[in-house]
Image (tube, grey):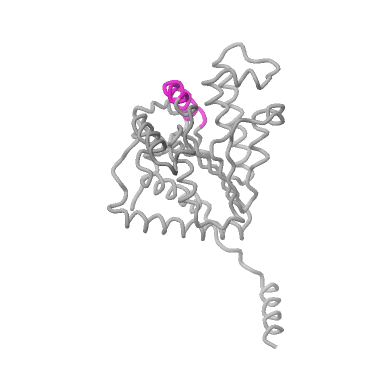
Amino acid sequence: MKIKLSDFRVREGDDVDLKGWPTLIDPLYKSKEQYVRLLKEHVDQLSAMQQLQYAINRHAILIIFQGMDAAGKDGVIRHVMSGINPQGCQVFSFKHPSAAELAHDFLWRPARDLPERGRIGIFNRSYYEEVLIVRVHRDILIGEGLPDPPLHDKQLWLERYRSITNFEKHLHFNGTRIIKFFLHLSKEEQRTRFLARIDEPQKNWKFSLADIQERGYWKSYKLAYEQCLGATSTSDSPWYVVPADDKQNARLIVSRIILETFKGLKMSYPKISAQRRHELLSIRKQLEE
């Protein structure tokens, strides 16, 4: 399977119009059996890469997932990261901020949850909510108690975009590689998945009235995502717009992009010195005796 990563990557400085980005593409697999085999190959490679990353202890990987409700974020995380050693990977979900979090700047919360070198961190939603849901629902912004709110909306979001890109630039310089995925779902596919959550008892827990209410803000979220993607996709910390109407396809694309990021680190197991080799041989001799 070949994936041209540039097909999904938002180039730095691009004006993003999501109408031009597909939510569905031709399948990258010919059958369910082939999909399972391909995904397993990716998962196995990711597991090996993560062990190598842990051994070298030079880089951290931060993976960010954003998307509309029912875009498949949970499923991608569950299937793609299923083979990773739990000791080397952590997942954080960004829900409504606590009172303590609201008392700090909006980047304080993610800073606490960043992955250590040698590990993978996953944000299921992220600090990007501060330029997405906060932009759509202005009452949330009022609750953040900013000391001097900018006089104009445009200035506020530009300042937050600048804060985010500077934050990510700092992380990149210090060894954290950031991969950002926007799971691009069509409104019709979201409707189909919402109906499934109602009709299938085992999925009822996933659905609430708030989901339907948020669906009513579709156009507002679309605009917020377009401006966010264009303003915060950089050469070091790019956004990938992943067609998400086909869940299996989305998982294969995401896993392949993560693998390519790992390969770009050009990792190899540390070489031991002659002194260390001599020490190991001495220990081996003692064990054999």
Quarter of the figure with the C terminus: bottom right
Q: Is residue 109 magenta?
A: no
Residue at 58 percent of width and 39 percent of height:
93
Of residues 60 and 271, the one drawn nearer to the viewer in this rendering: 60
Of residues 53 and 132, the one drawn nearer to the viewer in this rendering: 132
Question: Going by the picture, which residue comes out furthest to the front?
Answer: 201
Residue span colored magenta: 213-232
Classify 147 as above or below 276. Answer: above
- Pinpoint residue 168: horizontal percent, then vertical percent: 59, 36
Classify 165 as above or below 174. Answer: above
- Pinpoint residue 175: horizontal percent, then vertical percent: 61, 46
**How many discs mark residues in the rendered view?**
0
State left or right for residue 92 relative to residue 285. left
> Which secondary structure class fits the magenta region best?
helix
Residue at 31 percent of width and 40 percent of height:
25
State left or right for residue 35 relative to residue 79. left
Classify 38 as above or below 185. Answer: below
Question: Going by the picture, which residue comes out furthest to the top?
Answer: 151
Which of the 4 quarters of the picture holds residue 4? top left
Which of the 4 quarters of the picture holds residue 85? bottom right
Residue at 70 percent of width and 79 percent of height:
283
- Pinpoint residue 15: horizontal percent, then vertical percent: 42, 25
State left or right for residue 112 relative to residue 223. right
Question: Going by the picture, which residue comes out furthest to the bottom?
Answer: 289
- Pinpoint residue 281: horizontal percent, then vertical percent: 67, 80
